[in-house]
Image: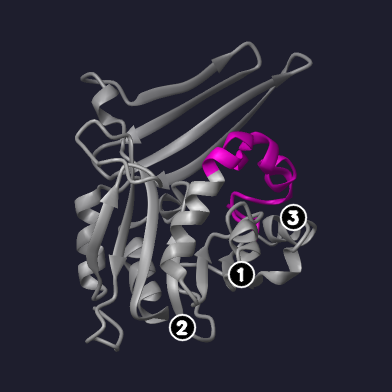
Amino acid sequence: MDDEDGYFGKSVAATYDDASAGMFAPGVVDPTVDFLARLAGRGRALELGVGTGRIALPLARRGVPVHGIDMSRAMVARLRDKPGGDDVGVTIGDFATTRVDGTFSVAYLVFNTIMNLTTQQAQVDCFRNVAAHLEPGGCFVIEVGIPELRKLPPGQRVVPFHVSPTRWAFDVYDVATQAMSSNYVDVAEGRGNYQSIPFRYVWPAELDLMAQLAGLRLRERWEGWTGEPFTNESHRHVSVWEKPVDEGGEGG
């Protein structure tokens, strides 16, 4: 990937909000913002992968000071064009390693964004980076799906998740490396356009170990933002790790 904005350059940023319209619905955004605002209290929030501001903007409107990290200038430009966009501070960089000034009462990664870090080391670095930014008692929140490996019969690597006359979308899994990709074929006026975005899927227990290496401990885990129990049938989880009050230094 040669684009300095990674896989979220101008062409993706231009249509991102429309393509992800369901994730911008009040029924999705409001519970997420409620959850994060409770954790933030009177403190600051740090969003990793702030994008076009789907969560940062409504959280800031709640009175929570929000700072974001994102490597895509194109996505951040979309955020800036929205009402209140200038109220969210943004640092351009890789959220696994980029440092910003000050400490935060909550940091968060939503909508599967932890998987945009495509190596285990980068995901570990992300936890350590967050731990360095959190104040004692602060929390790190991740929302991410459970890998759909139960849908794979022997010898199968592909899981389709959208099929229509003008679009096909499917995930490809490599269970030996935990590498995966989401792939899209869009057809317009008889011509097809193909896009593939790489990810690294990660298990809840693996995330807990990453948190432990960073000096964080699991506080709670739910299926969703409204406190649904997490079970073996859950397709995603919202997990919260806490920086112990008696350990003010960086973990790991």
| Amino acid type of the residue tagged 2 in the rendering | Thr
Q: Residue at x 78, y 58 (%)?
A: 83
Residue 18 image offset from top left, x and y in percent:
69, 36
**Residue position marked by numbered label 2 in the rendering:** 103
In magenta stretch: residue 37: no
Disc marking residue 78: 3
Region rendered in magenta: 1-28
Q: Are marks 3 and 1 in contact (CB under 8 Å)?
A: no
Residue 110 image offset from top left, x and y in percent:
46, 52
| Amino acid type of the residue tagged 1 in the rendering | Gly
Q: Residue at x 54, y 86 (%)?
A: 101
Q: Nearer the viewer, mark 1 or mark 2?
A: 1
Label 2: few (<14), some (14–19) or many (≥20) C-alpha neighbours in 10 Å: some
Q: In terms of depth relative to the viewer, which is nearer, 14 or 236?
A: 236
Q: CA distance from mark 2 to mark 3?
A: 26 Å
On the rendered structure, is 148 left or right of 40?
Answer: left
In magenta stretch: residue 20: yes
Q: In terms of depth relative to the viewer, which is nearer, 131 or 55?
A: 55
Label 1: few (<14), some (14–19) or many (≥20) C-alpha neighbours in 10 Å: few
Disc marking residue 63: 1
